[in-house]
Image (cartoon, coloured by chain):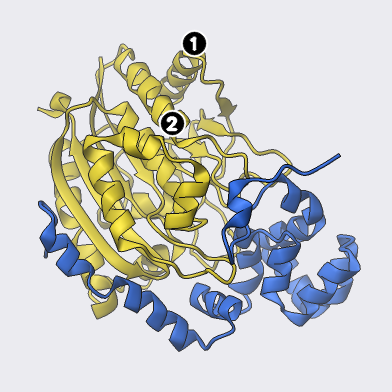
């Protein structure tokens, strides 16, 4: 049977991708931020997962505004990255796992989460930056990738509670896969940042840390909040934190906190990292 | 017919992207989306007005575009992620864009980011379990 061994959270902003491409990891601005990922990389090296489900939002690479799925699941054999106009070098392609993806799609739709299935899907920095943070040092991707894109771009977005519930359904879907696979789920985006308007540049460290604590032990705290409440605190792009709830929902209620890391500012953003281990990991 | 009012419309200095904004600026955002391709970025750079006309931009949005008025583009319904496809290839950083929204120098905007984060390491120490390097 497939086992979900843990969940990870991370920011996915392009500035991190640029810093990795320019090898700025030891630069004073970046060092503390990147050093804080080493325990996550060590855990991944020890646990050797087979599959990573990456929960992210597309920022206008695969999806234009003509068609915006609320929840889109990659069901392809491979995924390509491409020019987004943001100056990031394109990453090498990612291998998917079609059987596992379609199992998730079947199970999620049976559980009344009506996913959009994608057999061709360009993946943007929202997925590529987290993959680089976890595995760029290997020179290849050691896991099969399952992209799960959440609309955080155009209202109406799914509610925070809906994201948590999707995660719960995803947890059941993973657990019912008959083949032995070790799975990790990565919730990406956030924490507080606002790129737009006269309120651009807000970083709310207190709210970010409250989110990190509650994601661990009381995700309903965040799931109860409306988009307006979250945006007021975390900023328009800080709403991405709802994707952390998908990660959290997939894990059991009781998890072991293996790592907590926070740094601010990274570019315009408060950047939080969690590594939550499931009892299934041992 | 009426556009529904939402609580997020009341957050000052904030333009949450929704159906109303998207409907008002669909052509603008479609043009910005085309900048995923380098040849389109070059075609725009060579002749912005003609390129905007090809996408049928309304006069006020075209004017804001040609003036490089990011705040007005945002107010008209430009999506910030799509606007980045214009701004970043033109040499702006996200801090430059943030500073432009505030109408302040980029260094002041960067200082604003640092000021809000100033005591974050102390706050981590006040809580349990954070990594400290």
State which chain disc 2 sits on.
A
**Residue B39 seen in this snapshot:** no
| Above or below A29: residue B36 | above
Q: Residue at the spot x=77%, y=44% of the render?
A: B3
Along the line of sight, which residue is nearer the eye, A172 or A242?
A: A242
SS of the residue under disc 1: helix
Q: Position of residue B100 (x, y in %)?
A: 59, 80
| Above or below A198: residue A11 | above
Q: Residue A251 got which mark?
A: none
Report crowding for label 2: few under 14, some 14 to 19, many 20 or more residues within 10 A (C-alpha). Answer: many
What's the colour of chain A in the image? yellow
Q: Position of residue A145 (x, y in %)?
A: 39, 37
Q: Quadrant of the C terminus of chain A?
A: top left
SS of the residue under disc 2: helix
Q: Residue at the spot x=46%, y=81% of the render?
A: B109
What count of labels does the image hold?
Answer: 2
Q: Position of residue A189 (x, y in %)?
A: 41, 51
Chain identifier of the blue chain: B
Report crowding for label 1: few under 14, some 14 to 19, many 20 or more residues within 10 A (C-alpha). Answer: few
Describe residue A38's horizontal placement relative to residue A237 as left or right: left
Q: Residue A110 got which mark?
A: 1
Q: Write down the residue under mark 2.
A: A161
State which chain disc 1 sits on.
A
Q: Nearer the viewer, mark 2 or mark 1?
A: 2
Q: Position of residue A60 (x, y in %)?
A: 62, 51
Along the line of sight, which residue is nearer the eye, A267 or A192?
A: A192
Q: Residue at the spot x=72%, y=42% of the render?
A: B4
Describe residue B101's horizontal placement relative to residue A112 as left or right: right
Q: Earlier in the sequence, mark 2 or mark 1?
A: 1
Discs 2, 1: same chain: yes
């Amino acid at each position: 049977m497939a086992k979900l061994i843990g969940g990870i959270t991370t920011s996915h902003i392009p500035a991190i991708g640029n810093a990795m491409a320019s090898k700025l990891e030891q630069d004073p601005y970046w060092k503390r931020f990147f050093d804080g990922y080493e325990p996550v990389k060590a855990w991944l090296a020890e646990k050797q997962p087979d599959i990573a489900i990456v929960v992210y939002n597309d920022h206008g690479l695969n999806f234009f505004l003509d068609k915006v799925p609320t929840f889109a699941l990659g069901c392809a054999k491979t995924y390509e990255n491409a020019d987004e106009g943001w100056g990031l070098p394109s990453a090498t392609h990612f291998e998917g796992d079609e059987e596992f993806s379609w199992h998730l799609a079947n199970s999620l739709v049976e559980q009344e989460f009506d996913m959009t299935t994608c057999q061709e899907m360009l993946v943007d920095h929202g997925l590529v930056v987290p993959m680089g943070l976890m595995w760029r040092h290997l020179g290849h991707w050691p896991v099969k990738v399952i992209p799960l894109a959440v609309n955080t771009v155009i209202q109406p977005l799914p509610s925070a509670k809906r994201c948590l519930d999707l995660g719960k359904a995803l947890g059941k879907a993973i657990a019912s896969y008959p083949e032995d696979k070790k799975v990790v789920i990565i919730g990406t985006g956030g924490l507080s940042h606002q790129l737009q308007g006269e309120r651009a540049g807000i970083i709310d460290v207190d709210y970010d840390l409250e989110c990190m604590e509650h994601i661990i032990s009381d995700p309903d705290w965040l799931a109860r909040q409306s988009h307006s409440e979250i945006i007021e605190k975390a900023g328009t792009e800080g709403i991405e934190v709802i994707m952390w709830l998908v990660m959290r929902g997939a894990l059991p209620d009781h998890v072991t906190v293996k790592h907590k890391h926070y740094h601010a500012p990274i570019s315009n953003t408060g950047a939080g990292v969690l590594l939550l281990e499931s009892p299934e990991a041992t | 017919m009426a556009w529904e009012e939402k609580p997020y419309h009341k957050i000052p200095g904030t333009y949450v992207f929704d159906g109303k904004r998207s409907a008002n600026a669909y052509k603008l955002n479609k043009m910005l989306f085309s900048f995923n391709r380098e040849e389109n970025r070059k075609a725009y750079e060579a002749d912005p007005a003609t390129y905007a006309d090809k996408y049928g931009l309304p006069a006020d949005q075209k004017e804001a575009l040609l003036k490089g008025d990011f705040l007005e583009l945002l107010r008209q319904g430009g999506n910030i992620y799509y606007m980045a496809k214009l701004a970043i290839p033109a040499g702006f950083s996200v801090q430059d864009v943030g500073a432009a929204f505030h109408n302040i120098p980029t260094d002041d905007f960067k200082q604003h980011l640092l000021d809000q984060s100033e005591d974050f390491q102390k706050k981590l120490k006040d809580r349990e379990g954070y990594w400290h390097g």
